[in-house]
């Protein structure tokens, strides 16, 4: 996998600008694994999707992730220094793009002995559900391949609430990057909380910050040297930086 250069970032930004977040995530995944068919990538579980997006981000911007948040209790500003390699290390070793097999869960409730077969939610599931305004419960129901209570088949909408919790836990255990939570402690007041981290949304935010800077560089170099946009984007970042320095930019 190679990182994205300035022309790649501009093209990706142009294609993703008008899309909902879950579609953008699939676009980032396609940029990460350009050799794979888009249909197959859409079937990858969400955590596997995000693992590859984190790798693309690391190759484009480096492994260090800088972010900031505020303490929900005292509003102190916290700077977060994260390492994308730590997240990636939590992902199962899965070089193949084949979706992993469904997870089987057995447990008992007041309503009987249950056996559920659940597949891991994919990027496609999340994108299609978001477009319909679907809920997290619908996402779980969509991923239940087979549900049995005391051996009798049950429609996925009929599984009890306590079973849903077990399903969610099994999904996160099988696909840990699907639900990345940062454990945070405020240095000011000592409050501890966990905050979700969404790799595709974070990387997209960085791309949105970077694109106007690239365009600004093109503008400065084009207006000073008369070069075309293609010429300027054909220079690597170091050479663009050198010419900008000559211009005192
Ligand atoms: Zn605080």
Image: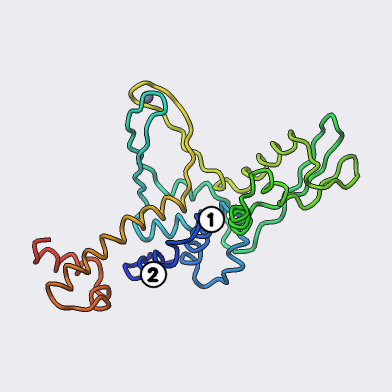
Element under label 2?
helix
Q: Is residue 69 above or below residue 13?
A: above
| Other-residue count near label 2 (Cα within 10 Å), few / some / many at <14 / 14–19 / ≥20 | few
Q: Quadrant of the C terminus?
A: bottom left
Q: Do residues under tags 1 and 2 come within 8 Å of each other at their CB atoms?
A: no
User: Can you give x and y, in whole percent of width and height, for residue 141 in the image?
Assistant: 73, 47
> Judging from the image, what secondary structure is the residue with disc 1 in?
helix
The residue that label 2 is drawn on is 11
Q: Which mark is residue 22?
A: 1
> Dot 1, crowdedness within 10 Å: few (<14), some or many (≥20)?
many
Q: CA distance from mark 1 to mark 2?
A: 18 Å
Q: x and y percent of residue 44 in the render?
A: 60, 59
Question: Looking at the rendered structure, which numbered label has been put on residue 216?
Answer: none
**Count of labels shown?**
2
- Is the CB–ligand 1 distance for label 2 below 8 Å? no
User: Looking at this view, is 137 or 153 the one in front?
Assistant: 137
Query: Which of pointers 1 and 2 lies earlier in the amino acid sequence?
Result: 2
Give me the residue at 41% from left, 66% from top.
12
Q: Residue furthest top?
A: 189
């Amino acid at each position: 996998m190679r990182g994205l250069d300035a022309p790649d970032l501009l093209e990706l930004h142009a294609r993703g600008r008008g899309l909902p977040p879950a579609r953008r995530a699939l676009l980032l995944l396609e940029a990460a694994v350009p050799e794979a068919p888009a249909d197959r990538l859409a079937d990858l579980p969400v955590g596997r999707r995000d693992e590859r997006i984190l790798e693309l981000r690391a190759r484009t911007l480096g492994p260090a992730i800088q972010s900031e948040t505020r303490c929900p209790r005292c509003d102190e500003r916290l700077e977060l220094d994260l390492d994308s390699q730590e997240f990636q290390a939590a992902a199962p070793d899965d070089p193949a793009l084949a979706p992993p097999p469904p997870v089987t869960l057995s447990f008992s409730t007041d309503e009987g002995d249950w056996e559920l077969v659940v597949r891991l939610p994919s990027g496609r599931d999340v994108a299609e559900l978001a477009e319909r305004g679907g809920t997290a419960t619908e996402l779980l129901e969509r991923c239940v391949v087979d549900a049995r209570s005391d051996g009798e088949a049950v429609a996925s909408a009929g599984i009890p609430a306590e079973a849903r919790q077990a399903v969610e836990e099994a999904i996160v255990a099988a696909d840990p990057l699907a639900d990345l939570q940062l454990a945070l402690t405020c240095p000011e007041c000592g409050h501890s909380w966990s905050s979700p981290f969404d790799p595709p949304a974070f990387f997209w935010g960085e791309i949105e910050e970077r694109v106007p800077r690239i365009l600004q560089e093109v503008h400065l170099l084009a207006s000073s040297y008369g070069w075309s946009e293609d010429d300027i984007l054909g220079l690597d970042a170091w050479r663009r930086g050198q010419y900008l320095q000559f211009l005192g930019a």
